[in-house]
Structures are given as C-alpha cells and as structure tokens.
Image: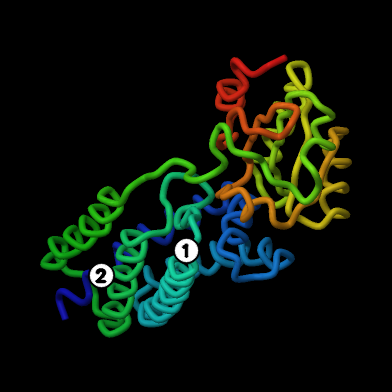
Amino acid sequence: MTVLGAAWPTLVVVLVTAAVGKVRDVRGFAAVIDGYRLLPRRLTLPAAVTVPAVEAVAAVLLVVPATRRWGGLLSAALFAVFVAAMVSVLRRGLDVDCGCFGSSRGSRVGPFTVARTGLLLVLAVMTAVAGAEPFRAAQIVPAVVFLGLVGAVTLLGPRAPDAGGPRAGTRFTLGVPVETATAGAPTLFALVSPACGLCTAMLPAFLAARARMRVVLVSADEERTVRGYLEDHGVDLPVLIDPDVYDNNGIPWPPYAVVTDGTGAVLAADGADSPDRLGALLSGHSS
C-alpha cells in the first residue's frame, strides 16, 4: 500500500494546475471544448465552467484523508472522460488543442496527451484503492517518481504550433464566392468565435488592421450570437457566417487570419493570437 498511497500528491498538483489554467480563460477553454466537436456549442461554456470546478473539488477531496477515496474515484472518472474524448478526436482525424491545462496552445491531442491522461487515470485508481492511508516518509520517493513520470510525458510530447490551415497560392473557401467578400481588393479574413477569449482580445487589432487593408470577420457560430457579440464590443466590421469554414480550409483554431488577394487566392495565413503575430502576417501584404 506504500506505493499506492503515494499517488495522490501528483493528482493534486495536476488537478490544481489544470483548474487554474482553465479558470484564467473560461471562454477560451469553451472554444477548446468546441474544437472536440462532442457537445452542442450552447453547452461548451457550461462545460468550461463545470470541468475546472470538478477538478478543484477532486483536489480538495484528495487532500483530506477521510475523503481521499472519493477524490480518487472522482479523478478517475474525470480522466476516463478525458481519455475517451481524446481517442474520439484521434479516430476522427481532428487536429485540436488538448485543453488539458486551459486554452493555451502548444499541446495538441495526440499519443502523448493520451498517455499522460492514461497515466493519471492509473494514479487515480491507485489512490481510490489505497483510500485514507496516511502519507508517510517512505512514500516521498514514489510520489516524486510519479510526478516526474507525468512531467516527462508532458515534456516529451510534441508542442506543435497551430497546424494546418490554407497555404499561400491556394484558394480560400467560403460559403459565398470569395470575390464578393473581397470587393476585388486584398482582404484580411479574421476567423473569430464569441466563445473564444483570445478572439475578444484580438478584436481591437482586427479593427486597427482596416488602416492597412479590407477586413472581414468570419465565424462558424450562429449569426444572431455573432452579431450580438460584435455589437457588445463595438465592432462594426463586415461579418460572414460559414459553419464549414474550418473544415473546408483545414483551419485548426480561432483566432485565425487569412490574407487573400482580390480573387480569393491566399497570400498568407496563420494563427492570430497576438497583435504582433497578426502584424507579422500582414507585413508585406498591406495595400
């Protein structure tokens, strides 16, 4: 039981870190959940609130010996759901951020994220089996080993930047003829979502880009929701609604920017999660 009882400190560290990361940008995490395409979009924000709350509750239950077994069972249930969701993503060939520690990019769903979550699931089961066994000095070494294993799997996993997306020279595909949206001029198509915290932060940068070229917002969300969102933030840019824009162009995530010429041919495309990144994308393509 010495080894089994040493698993819970690792779970507490991971759960607290994950919950804090998600709480920092709840709307961004909702966009991560939406990328998994397992829930209706209207449920992604409630899920983004619920998941870190459950993680925090599980961490508290693990710290208290009398409730540690319940904490282990709750953690096991969480990690089992996470593993199932990731496997579903891989089976469908999607390329999305895992969202394991919030909405920050870099950790894509893949074999390493599944392996890490599977390891945490095993540790949660071990904790449930050990129950309220008090933590002893002899358990320090295995506890450090468990935490090191989780950290090693995290570091070994590839931290890919935003993958996919249209390449220069290809055509940007929309639900309407692209030429009607460009009005025959070079155009920045900025992909946004009301559920994306980074998108909201980038709205002023997209507005400022009007000084350099035509700017059109594109969203896959419901038109009424998008227009209300833009009105609330004082954004008067033209907007197009295309539920298939991500699939049709291989775009992994908002906020994303595509610069085209007047005919819709792609000049440049990349993630647009900061003004500097957007500025670099626009450099050399401004009118």
Residue sitting nearer the eye, 272 or 234: 272
> x%, y% of residue 160?
39, 44
Picture layout, residue 174 above or below residue 92: above
Task: Give the residue type that dot 1 points to.
Answer: Gly
Quarter assignment of residue 231:
top right
In this picture, residue 213 sits left or right of residue 88: right
Q: Quadrant of the N terminus?
A: bottom left
Residue sitting nearer the eye, 87 or 23: 87
In this picture, residue 213 sits left or right of residue 10: right
Q: Which mark is residue 7?
A: 2
Density class for disc 2 (Cα within 10 Å; few <14, some 14-19, many ≥20) is many
Residue at image coords 50%, 55%: 96
Quarter assignment of residue 35:
bottom right
Residue at image coords 73%, 24%: 186
Residue at image coords 26%, 79%: 126
> x%, y% of residue 53?
56, 65
Q: Secondary structure at mark 2?
A: loop
Marks 2 and 1, Cα distance to the nearest angstrom?
33 Å
Picture layout, residue 3 above or below residue 264: below
Q: Nearer the viewer, mark 2 or mark 1?
A: 1
Density class for disc 1 (Cα within 10 Å; few <14, some 14-19, many ≥20) is few
Picture layout, residue 87 above or below residue 175: below
Task: Give the residue type that dot 2 points to.
Answer: Ala
Residue sitting nearer the eye, 162 or 80: 162
Mark closer to the chain start, 2 or 1: 2
Q: Which residue is mark 1?
A: 93
Q: Secondary structure at mark 1?
A: loop
